[in-house]
Image (cartoon, rainbow, N blue to C red):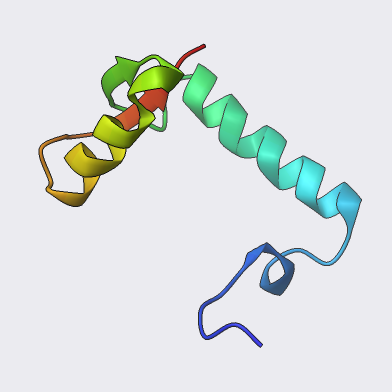
Amino acid sequence: MFPWPVGAHYVATRVELLARAGAVLGWIEERVLDIRIGGRRPPAQAATAHTDLASRRTTGKLLLIP
């Protein structure tokens, strides 16, 4: 058992999962939910990205873009 909640603790069926995911993605599209992108890096810089995250040198999401 996990000591932290996981998706299975919140959704019982695939239909419910798709509905909730659709709602969240809709909020992002409508800009009700603000997602901040703090940086974009190529996969070759994944190790640097992890170091930056661990050392708190980033804000927002850090994306690896192929």
- The quadrant in which the N terminus is found is bottom right
Residue 33 point in image, percent of width and height: 41, 33
Residue 16 point in image, percent of width and height: 82, 53
Residue 64: quarter of image: top left
In the rendered image of this protein, does residue 33 appear above or below residue 3? above
Residue 58: quarter of image: top left
In the rendered image of this protein, does residue 53 appear above or below residue 14? above
Residue in the picture at 26% in, 20% down: 39
Residue 31, visible in the rendered structure: no
Residue 29 point in image, percent of width and height: 52, 18
Q: Between residue 11 and residue 60, name the one nearer to us.
A: 60
Q: Between residue 13 and residue 2, name the one nearer to us.
A: 2
Residue 30 point in image, percent of width and height: 49, 19
Number of dots carrying numbers: 0
Q: Is residue 30 left or right of residue 6?
A: left
Residue in the picture at 32% in, 35% down: 47
Q: Is residue 15 left or right of residue 47?
A: right
Residue in the picture at 30% in, 41% down: 50
Residue in the picture at 17% in, 35% down: 59
Q: Between residue 29 and residue 7, name the one nearer to us.
A: 7
Residue 26, visible in the rendered structure: yes
In the rendered image of this protein, does residue 13 appear above or below residue 39? below
